[in-house]
Amino acid sequence: MKSHTNSQSSVHNSVVEKDAQCVMQTYGRQPIVLSKGAGSRVWDVNGNEYIDCVAGIAVNNIGHCHPKMVAALKVQAEELIHVSNLYYTEAQAKLAEELVNVTGMDRVFFCNSGTEAVEAAMKLARVATDKTDFIAVENSFHGRTLGSLTLTYKDLYRKPFRPLVQGESFVPYNNSQAIADAITENTAAVVMEPIQGEGGIIVPSDSYLKEVRQICDDTGTLLIFDEVQTGFGRTGEWFCKDHSGVEPDIMTMAKALGGGFPMGAIAAREGISFGRGEHAATFGGGPLACAAALASIEVIREEKLAQRSKEIGEYFRNKLENMSLDDVVEVRGRGLMLGVEFNRNCADLVDHGRENGILLNCTSENVLRIAPPLVITKEEIDQVVAVLEQA
Ligand SMILES: *Cc1c(COP(=O)(O)O)cnc(C)c1O
């Protein structure tokens, strides 16, 4: 594959300059300005093409600018963009019914992002149990607002913002006894990702989730699965919980829910619900977001993307496992949520990938996270692995 040009267009330079001057510098951005996407490819303003193994961080599951998504947004935008939850809309009712069907839960509440979904789940757990405390697990990531940050493990993210919401404790992941030992009479809920994403693509044992479910049942504690990153076909099933058959009491969704349009939601089992006035979001479940989510769900279903994620994920995983690189410790994950752990920081591989037409992301410093659109082809996967092998 041809190496990418390093000479930058004036558009590139002006964007980077404006960002440096006007945007709070919270992000360590890759030095490219993206302007177009289709399927599993994106293009920068210099005309370079990339195979996207990031997918907006597990967001673009149906690929970039899927024609059905574009059409649905256009149609809805010409009819109604926003009203308010003071009124009903057809799009919201339809999506609620779809989500109840695909999650197997009883009711949903709509918001706009992953962190908001976690906030909603925390409020719901408190109001449903009349208890205050949460047990989360080490290396968890649940978001950056004050409530969800309380359940996010990394001290780097938490420390400057204390005091957070009170009543959290962290126990090792994949150790059910630690949860049993940590539950008290004040514990409202146990919260976890069924596969940890930001924490480095950590897959727990099959029995772990079942044991945690049993412990929660025995103690009257709610179980919250954060499926923000694992949802909508990413791991080879509609939701990661479906691999284990373990049903949470509350689950969170966001990232791929709107197929790229910002949206979040929680779903809860029968008997667990907000009452009138207990929670609200101005933009939650707006017509445009709901139209996007409906289109995305339709594409996942029609193109059998969950099944595809399972099959093509296995192909990808095999190729990664057989890669001729010495410093690989382990390849892990499920479906197209894959992690390659190195015995060193792998930021240089992200640069190498980008310079050779592959977008990659490194999480937890030494784990290459691979989460491409679920429409990625075997030929594209071969190209990705070939570039990694040249490193
Ligand atoms: C990304 C993520 C969040 C936060 O979502 P935002 O939309 O960035 O607020 C929460 N939980 C998990 C598991 C995530 O991966």
Image (cartoon, helix red, strand yellow):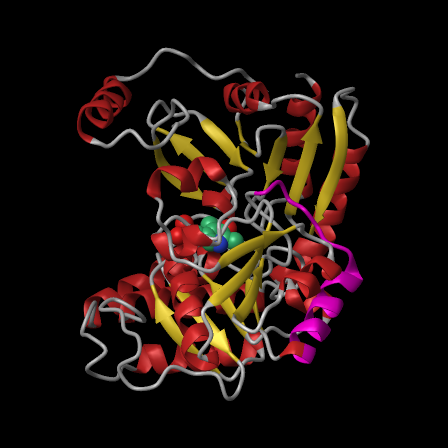
Which quadrant of the figure has residue 108?
A: bottom left
136 up-or-down from 139: above or below: below
Q: Nearer the viewer, residue 54 or 228?
A: 228
Looking at the image, which residue is at 41% across and 12% down? Answer: 6
Looking at the image, which residue is at 64% across and 53% down? Answer: 195
Q: Nearer the viewer, residue 316 or 246?
A: 246
Task: Using residue 200 as the reference point, say whether residue 47 is left or right of it.
Answer: left
Of all residues, the one furthest to the top in this rendering is 7
Which quadrant of the figure has residue 136?
A: bottom right
Of all residues, the one furthest to the front in this rendering is 185
Q: Is the N terminus in the top left, top right, bottom left or bottom right quadrant? A: top right
Looking at the image, which residue is at 65% across and 30% down? Answer: 383
Q: Nearer the viewer, residue 91 or 177?
A: 177
173 up-or-down from 29: above or below: below
Is-magenta flag for residue 231?
Answer: no
**Image coords of residue 296 (percent x, y):** 46, 63
**Image coords of residue 88 (percent x, y):** 25, 84
Looking at the image, which residue is at 65% across and 77% down? Answer: 219
**Image coords of residue 97 (percent x, y):** 45, 82
Residue numbers of the magenta segment: 199-218
Task: Using residue 176 as the reference point, say whether residue 290 is left or right of it.
Answer: left
Q: How many marks?
A: 0
137 up-or-down from 359: above or below: below
On the question of residue 59 being in view, the answer is no
Mainly helix, strand or loop, the magenta region? Answer: helix
193 up-or-down from 243: above or below: above
